[in-house]
Image (cartoon, rainbow, N blue to C red):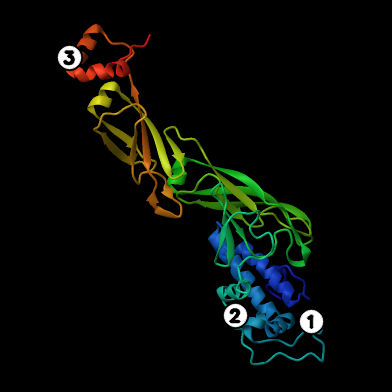
Amino acid sequence: MGVDYYNILKVNRNASDDDLKKAYRRLAMIWHPDKNANKLEAEAKFKQISEAYDVLSDPEKRQIYDLYGEEGLKSGQAPPPKRSARGYGSNQQRPDPNFRFNPRTPDDIFAEIFGESSNGVYGSNANNGGGSGVKRDGFFRSTTTNGGTSYGGGENSGGGSGGLRKAPPVENGLMCSLEELYKGATRKMKISRNVLDGHGKPRVVEEILTIDIKRGWKKGTKITFPEKGNEEPGVIPSDLIFVVDERPHPMYTRDGNDLIVKHEITLVESLTGKTIELMTLDDRDITIPITEIVKPGHEVVVPNEGMPISKDPRKKGNLRIQIDVRYPKKLTEAQKYELRRVLGGSFKKMSFVLFKEEK
């Protein structure tokens, strides 16, 4: 038989057209490459699902496949059908001997199925609990309050083809450094899970999942690996979700797309000027000259030196330098005299604020 298209769509051999559509919608929603971290795996699965639906939804292709299997379908050189072939007796019409396998593209199939809805939302739970959203590439996407993106569309996640229940998603934290979220990174995550063998018995397997951390991702961003949870009889495996968290940085603090750094200067520097030198999160040295008189709480804004903006990583937020002034703990009489002499009348107005001695 070769490839088992029925098993790929998780339907039985008597599945109706409606059963096939339901199964395709659910699996296409899970494995569409646009919503998976592992693009190569998702594209392969999506192509396999599309081919299975293309064959089983076409009466002629399905008849040949049931009689001769995948090899006979694709080669066009069908051997005589086995007497045990299900559903085809001696009175069954024979397939066209001139038939040639001509598969449709996954994009055409996807557009055909998901284009049937007027608004792109399938099932009452498509928005997964509320919030605004837009239709894109056949999916209903709603931006969550924590910066992540959830995907709807297809069949309700609690149902599916044949009434199978899907296990609830499993979430794990993904702690990332600020440097990783600034520059982007790749993580390899080793997982262990139960899978069912050909006899329905569970066995433990280990897998390595690859997560491509995108520049500018925020705390709360979710990366979903569809159906990577434990397998159980009669239950669709849960999705495995990693939720981004930010590890505190010794120098920088993140505020949305901005980066904040606190810097202390002396009283003399606050009056005469200072050049601040900083190392960025991608290891560049930058200098920021301070030429004006600085008061405590002053903030210097450096455009385009903050975090990359995830929707357009070519753009960045701002770097905000919050300056604190370090006052002397004590002044000698000679120092006070010199300050009075240098500053003159302007000193009298500032002396109470700037030179109040600490007791």
The amino acid marked with disc number 2 is Pro
Give amino acid for label 1: Ala
Q: Label 2: few (<14), some or many (≥20) within 10 Å? A: few
Work out how far the residue at label 1 is from the one at label 2, CA to CA, in angstroms.
Answer: 23 Å
Frontmost residue, 311 versus 40: 311
Give percent across and percent down for residue 300: 33, 36
Q: What x and y, as percent, mark residue 168?
A: 71, 52
Residues marked 1 and 3 touching at CB (< 8 Å)? no
- The residue pinned by badge 2 equals 103
Picture quadrant where residue 143 is located = bottom right
- Give the x, y percent position of residue 223: 57, 52
Question: Considering only vertical position in the picture, is 15 above or below 76?
Answer: above
Disc 1, SS: loop
Q: Which residue is mark 3?
A: 341
Q: Nearer the viewer, residue 220 or 145?
A: 145
Residue matched to label 1: 85
